[in-house]
Amino acid sequence: MGRTLAEKVLSRVSGGADVRAGDEVMARPDFVIVYDFPGYTDVIFRQMKEDFGIERVNDASRYAVFIDHMVPTATPKEEELHIQTRNWCSEQGVPLYERRGIGHQVSAELGYATPGAFAVHFDGHVSQLGAYGTLAIGLRRNILEAFVRERVSLKVPHTTRINLTGTLRKGVMARDVFHHIVRVIGPSACRFQVMEVGGPGLDHISLEGRQTICGLAMFTGAVTAVMNPDATSLAYTDPRNRISTPAVCSDPDAEYAAVHTIDLTDLEPIIVLPPNPANTRNLSEHLGIEVQSGYLGSCASGRLEDLRIAAQILKGRRVKDGFSLHVIPTSQDIMAKAAAEGLISTLVEAGAFTSSPSCDYCFGRIATMTAGQKAVSTGTLNVPGRMGSPDSQIFLVNAAAVAAASIEGKITDPRKYL
Amino acid sequence: MALANLKGRVAWVFEEENFDVDLIVGVKNIKITDIAELAKAAMETYDPAFAASVRPGDMIVGAGNFGYGHPHYPPLRALGHLGVRGIVAESFSPGFWRGEISMGTPLVSCPGIVGAVSRWDEIEVDWAAGVVRNLTRGTSLAFEALSSADYLMVETGGLLPYLKSQMQTA
């Protein structure tokens, strides 16, 4: 019986013996990635020293710290946290990436998405590195283990395989594919498993779109998502890889917990209604709901293809008076490219508010909604209170639908503008 | 390996799949840090008399994929303050599972549990036998074994004491 990508990666990093789904292993992460956030990094840095007497992490180059939340700072306390983070990284010799963009995206740009590598984070959206064949798992507070010893305890996950067929129609984007996967297989189908996505349908989805699909994997219950590396992804990762490790793919006869085939041909733009990410519907059945703000950005969207389609829709049009449209490119690199393409000027001329990358729009730290308000968003999550008041509402849609809603001030089918 | 069995009443049954635990205290109360105030808000929309009727050692029963969404820690802190000792559910969402196991909260994944208990039934989680017993009805149901790391984390009281014990024996 063949092995899955996850089994192969975890075999390599847990000593080389052949491990299989269900085995309990001690796995050495190739990369330990975090962003500074109160309750996580400050606590970890303190506990390392005070509870474990550890002055320095083992092999500092394995670690990466991002400052992408609370950017820019709004209180002295936030700045104090960043100072503490800068000092810690400097003392430890750990690479710090500040204000370069949302860490999950910048990680890919900087080569942490090495195919075949094993990465851990506390935040589960790191799963998007799986688009390049990296096994990247969010451990929540258990990330502490990766700071105080070389290996982390892990149960080798089973894998559910999703085969995509067909091509996407105009105005339908990668995040619609993900939301559709949730609709078809359900929000718990991949519980504690790896969601592996492949099939001929994936050939037509960009690397950016693949990151979107993998990055949202947690809403199927998955601990992460992976895609077998292909020529397209290897062309991106080859010049960036940070470590030398063989890229691996799942064997054709690998043992899967389940296999689903999902055809994309007739897929329409999707809207995820409040109050949770399982609430996926066809957008065309929910037109006309009045919305006051729109967010195009986050680690799930906000990449070039998202900015391009929004610019295409908004070119020569205006954001409706009183509507707040925030367009926040996911990384500095993306922002520079978007500027060079003229996308930023098109969006700004239409009335969009743009800023340098920050995670803060996604969780309501800024652009905060008050009770009764509604937003269309390409953020990661639509639970109550995520973008402000618990009595505000979030409708998750693709980038085109955010742009279309900003013109009309209501949920709008973006296909009529394309 | 000697976790003490859990024994107590079923203080509530959440029958909805994909239950968002933030609703236990209500999203508007999620940022309350004072534990007494937080505990006061716990379950008030489900049963205003909950705090008065729950006893130390009682447990919560949940349905499939319990803890889905974006679970925060305060709801379980609040329940713990009121005496709730653990959660038995059909299955758990992984993010919630990891978060709460790291806090030392006993979580028991037990398919069939929702149909096997009623509110205020007396139940026992027998770790060694791998069963949840309904002492009121005289029935029992097998649960899914914890991984050894998760077991030790619950036994030692959470991530920090677990890691300390591991580092000492290493």
Image (spheres, helix red, strand yellow):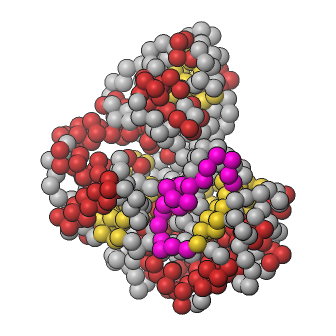
- Residue A169: x percent and y percent? 78, 76
Q: Nearer the viewer, residue A282 or A200?
A: A282
Question: What residue is drawn where x is 54% and y is 31%?
Answer: B25
Q: Nearer the viewer, residue A273 or B163?
A: A273
- Residue A331: x percent and y percent? 47, 75
Occupied quadrant, residue A18: bottom left
Q: Nearer the viewer, residue A342 or A381?
A: A342
Q: Is residue A376 magenta?
A: no
Magenta region, main secondary structure: loop
Position of the N terminus of chain A by quadrant? bottom right
- Res A348 seen here: yes
Left or right of A20: which side holds B49?
Answer: right
Question: What residue is drawn where x is 61% and y is 18%?
Answer: B48
- Residue A387: x percent and y percent? 57, 53
Position of the C terminus of chain A by quadrant? bottom right
Q: Nearer the viewer, residue A45 or B107?
A: A45
Question: What residue is drawn where x is 41% and y is 65%?
Answer: A71
Q: Which residues are magenta?
A: A354-374
User: B98 above or below A87?
Assistant: above
